Amino acid sequence: MSFKTKWDKKAANYSRYSSTLNPFMKKVFDFIKLNKISFKDKSVVDIGCGTGVYTIEIAKSAKEVLGIDFSLPMLEVMLEDAKSNDIHNIKTIHSRWDDAKIVKDFDIAFCSMSPAVKDNETFLKMHNCAKEKIYLGWAGKRESSFLNPIFSKFNSFYKAPSGGLELLNWLKSRKIPFNFKEINEKRVSIYSLEDAIENASWHLGINNVEAKKDELEKMVKEAVNKKGEIENIVESKMVLICCK
């Protein structure tokens, strides 16, 4: 199964937009405001927008938003949620960021927790397409009470994706001014047995870790608590970068 297909399959169970911002998202938007970046009446490109968790919130005040993602099911979820929230100023491009044709300059480029922006070429493309840039990425820590032992069982480890720290180094090496903030997050999720197996299988697959189905299902069943549920506590560190 290809990397893209794995993300397409995840769309149905991925996080979706809520008009009530969670505490983590509030920290993100507060820091953006502190850096005097406003989305009001601006043109915005959201790179690797996924299901539009941030895109739709940004579109509430922006003039127009272009969401780019290589997963069509993710984009379809975003447009469905935008419509249900009476948001009609979002357009989409179904493409990898590497291949996307950018024919105009934007006021703001935004990217959150996406593998789309990950190296010198994609950093530069994001930097050059807009006057102001906002990037939210991993900062080297992601611990999962549920997934860590599963990855260990299959001779691997559950690691934070690349992105945030690499972009900080990229900006420093080019002497590009920026402000940043590290944000810690602790998230608790409750899964049914079926959802937990699907979640574990997806994370193993996206990291190219081979696992025998019967062994994986046995491990997941052992994690079921007295309520018949599986609790997953994820502690992560992210870095939020604002650059003009």
Image (spheres, rainbow, N blue to C red):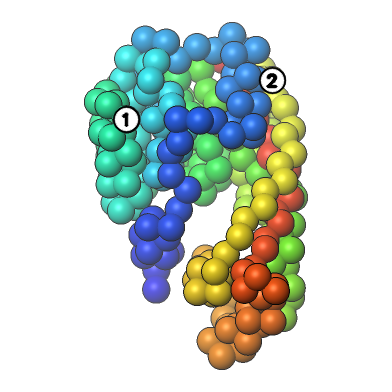
Q: In this rendered view, identify the residue nearer to me: 161 or 146.
A: 146
The location of residue 235, given as percent across then percent down, is 74, 50
Q: In the picture, residue 100 is in which quadrant?
A: top left
Mark seen at residue 179? 2
Badge 2 vs badge 1, beta-carbon distance below 8 Å: no
Q: Secondary structure at mark 2?
A: strand
Q: With 15 as the anchor, is 167 left or right in this view?
A: right
CA neighbours of label 1 inside 10 A, class few (<14), some (14 to 19), many (20+): some
- Is residue 14 at all visible to an observer of this figure? yes
Q: Residue at x 66, y 75 (%)?
A: 224
Q: Earlier in the sequence, mark 2 or mark 1?
A: 1
Quadrant housing the C terminus: top right
Q: Residues within 10 Å of mark 2 (few under 14, many from 20)?
A: some
Q: Quadrant of residue 174?
A: top right
**Is any part of residue 174 visible from this angle?**
no
Which residue is found at the position 29% from the left and 51% from the top?
72
Name, please, the residue furthest toward the bottom: 214
Q: Amino acid at mark 2?
A: Asn
